[in-house]
Amino acid sequence: MLRTVGIIGGGQLARMMIVPALELGFEVKVLAEAEKSPAKLAATVGDHTDLQTVREFANTVDVITFDHEHVPLQILEALIADGVNVQPSPKALLFAQNKLAMRKRLAELNVPMPDWAEVSAAEDIDAFLASHGGVAVLKTATGGYDGKGVRIVRSGVDATDWLAEGKALLIEEKVNFVRELAQLSARNSSGQWLAWPVVQTIQREGVCSEVHSPADHADSESAAKIAEAIATGLGVTGVLAVELFETAGGKLLVNELAMRPHNSGHFSIEGSVTSQFEQHLRAVLDLPLGSTEGTSAYAVMLNLLGPETSNTFAENFEKAWVLESNSHIHLYGKEYRAGRKMGHITALSSDSLADARAQALATYNALLA
Ligand SMILES: Nc1ncnc2c1ncn2[C@@H]1O[C@H](COP(=O)(O)OP(=O)(O)O)[C@@H](O)[C@H]1O
Ligand SMILES: [Mg+2]
């Protein structure tokens, strides 16, 4: 019987897994990068890129899972050789760490994607641009998040720095999408798979700012089919987030993958019978998955990105609670920085997305005031 879940990474995702882990009857330990991490309640501090540190941590837990995808795969392979239970396995995790490996593998699975190519020289970029209208999206294969590692290019010259640094790069057709969607689902190691409704995500400057669940009039059947093909095809365990572009014709194209709870699923804490955090734990512990039915017809989540001048979220937190009706404030206990993800608000409504959004916005404004 498994008793202790080990989470590598001490961010808000680990923080939000702590309570459901305890509620499921497990102990939880976190390997965090810093003393003041959001998951400090359960954390020891250590370097997740150091094999010895990760090995010692693994010795104190029964299963290893993740808050982020930055643990080097060689370290995870070494743990597996030691007999450690790592979920998702490094074989699957590769495709969340490396966008080039992901594109290659999804092409084999015939998953719909933007046109793309691997590039290693300015001439490769110019050749792709010549056949794709002169503008494209260049990405570093690894290490990117929140729009870092993604840039619009109009010439091979735009990539001089990344090429000089020897970064593995891929280039993609610049999709003229109508909106971005995300399909969240989870798969346990026995192969049971369940999806939440497909949601709409709204990015500002490359950072997620809003999520609407469910996405209004989306092709939910296609989105779920794509996610299931990826979850089974890649042998994913835990939560799988599939970021999607929706084109004018309603066609869905896969942008990228995450194999852990994801910002697009925060609404599920209040908005779903089973939250993504509980479901991730159920999946990596190979327990039966919980129901993904909504607790309300509509949910809207707003990210609390650090304001420009000061951390008004912390200052106004208690005042804003007065407005609380169906609107729930989550703060991550992070040190304030402008633009940083400091927390989120979820509001539910049985009426409409507009109603849920209006409630969330009222709470948001109270936090900013
Ligand atoms: N091929 C593309 N066409 C148009 N926009 C894109 C494309 N790829 C990425 N983007 C935009 O850039 C954002 C960040 O890209 P993504 O690959 O998801 O990187 P990150 O790892 O930073 O989330 C996307 O959410 C989308 O808004
Ligand atoms: Mg992304």
Image: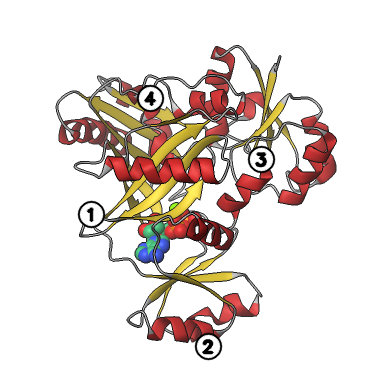
State which tag comes first along the sequence, 3 or 1.
3
* Tag shown at residue 250: 1
Amino acid type, callout 2: Glu
Residue of label 2:
123
Amino acid type, callout 1: Gly
Instruction: Say how many tags the image has.
Output: 4
Q: Position of residue 7 (x, y in %)?
A: 65, 32
Residue of label 3:
89
The answer to whether the residue labelled 4 contacts the one labelled 1, judged by CB atoms less than 8 Å apart, is no
* Tag shown at residue 292: 4
Residue at the image point whose x is 56% and y is 82% from the top? 160
**Crowd band around label 2 with a 10 angstrom C-alpha radius: few (<14), some (14–19), many (20+):** few
State which tag comes first along the sequence, 2 or 4.
2
The answer to whether the residue labelled 1 contacts the one labelled 2, judged by CB atoms less than 8 Å apart, is no
State which tag comes first along the sequence, 1 or 2.
2
Local secondary structure at mark 4: loop
Instruction: Give above or below for 15 relative to 224.
Output: above
* Ligand 1 visible in quadrant: bottom left
Local secondary structure at mark 3: loop
